[in-house]
Image (tube, rainbow, N blue to C red):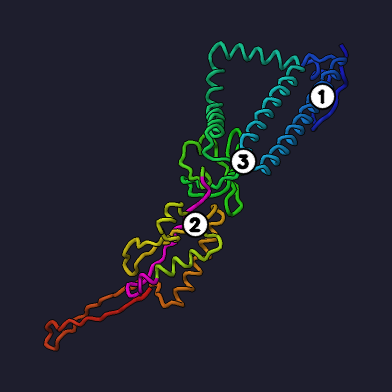
Amino acid sequence: MIYFPYTRFGGRRFAIGAILNYFHLQSGDALYYLVSIALVIVFLFIIRTIINRLFRRAKQVMQQRGHDSSSLNFVRYTLLAIVYFFCITAVADQIPALTSLGTLAKSLLAGSGILAVVIGIAGQEAAGNLVSGIMILIFKPFKIGDIIRYLDKDISGVVEEITLRHTVIRTFENKRLIVPNGTINSQVVENADYGDERICIFLDVGVSYDSDIEKAMAVLARVIRSDPGFLDNRTPGEIEAGAPEVLVRVTSFADSSIQLRGFAWAENPSESFRMKSDMLRAVKREFDAEGIEIPYPHRTVILERKEAKPDGGAGDAKTEHNTDMR
């Protein structure tokens, strides 16, 4: 047996030969093990690069053709996990001490049942997220590119990625919300793109009680109809029956206004945001031009004050009215 000279590292002396002997590595075998481990690592990086490039290209093609690419990320991460597992196993097999140590530990823990308990506790959450991810891919409550609203946190955004563990949601502020699959799979999620991308916009406007309500409803319908993104959602039967192109209804009598609601249909959620903003601005402009008042709350404060008489008796009460308009 050949012993290697001592060397200094961090102020301490280590015998390289002693370290190699501890791992049952002879001087002639050390190079073999190191080369084997290096080859496994190189193989890992090559395979990982090939898988990432292939799936990235496949995702681009599927998105260009309008197909759902949600399952690609899941399959990619599954393949990478398998590759990592086999490479780590191959590296561990190259060191006899690790192999014998692993066998000894496995026999001790398995005999007492500790291994099963430890693995079960440590992997419970990971397994739950994995199963939830599979359920999401099978039943497809949402997919990559869908606009969803996470009701538990009242956060809306676009689904950007679905992995083995979590789902990535890109909010409209361009922030990323990382939600574990087990969590989002057990919560209520509002999906604006599920089945039908068309969306109905509720355009709520209040008019004063002195205003001509019929005129206000007609102006509101005209504003909705004149928007370039307006979508006529009537069926052929409704068109034949003479149903109005834009539906406007009175929804309630508020404290200081009559609430009107116009129903405007948009082609998709992205277009609906632009439409609602433009239509609200147009409603204010048209109501001002037509003399239709959009009221604001009025508050009337009544103050009672009693003046004392000269003889010390109670005086007459005076009432003051103060109207605060807000």
Nearer the observer, disc 3 or disc 2? 2
- Look at mark 3 in the image and give the residue it sits on: 161
Give the distance between the C-alpha atoms of the residues marked 3 and 2, in whole angstroms: 34 Å
Report the span colored magenta: 196-215
Disc 1 marks a residue whose amino acid type is Leu
Q: Which mark is residue 232?
A: 2
Q: Quadrant of the C terminus?
A: bottom left
Q: Earlier in the sequence, mark 2 or mark 1?
A: 1
Q: Earlier in the sequence, mark 3 or mark 2?
A: 3
In this image, 290 relative to 137: left or right?
A: left
Nearer the observer, disc 2 or disc 1? 2
The kind of secondary structure element at disc 3 is: strand
Q: Where residue 168 sits: x, y (%)?
A: 59, 42
User: Which residue is painted at 45% across and 76% down in the image?
Assistant: 288
Judge by depth and name the residue closer to the eye, 149 or 321.
Answer: 149
Judge by depth and name the residue closer to the eye, 235 or 272.
Answer: 235
Q: Earlier in the sequence, mark 1 or mark 3?
A: 1
Disc 2 marks a residue whose amino acid type is Asp
Q: Residues within 10 Å of mark 3 (few under 14, many from 20)?
A: many
User: Which residue is painted at 44% across and 67% down in the image?
Assistant: 220
Q: Is residue 231 above or below residue 9?
A: below
Judge by depth and name the residue closer to the eye, 307 or 79.
Answer: 79
Q: Is residue 151 above or below residue 20?
A: below
- Residue 20 in magenta stretch: no
Question: Which residue is at the far front?
Answer: 240
Q: Residues within 10 Å of mark 1 (few under 14, many from 20)?
A: few
Disc 3 marks a residue whose amino acid type is Glu
Q: Is residue 76 above or below residue 151?
A: above
Give the distance between the C-alpha atoms of the residues marked 1 and 3, in whole angstroms: 32 Å
Q: Which mark is residue 39?
A: 1
Q: Quadrant of the N terminus?
A: top right
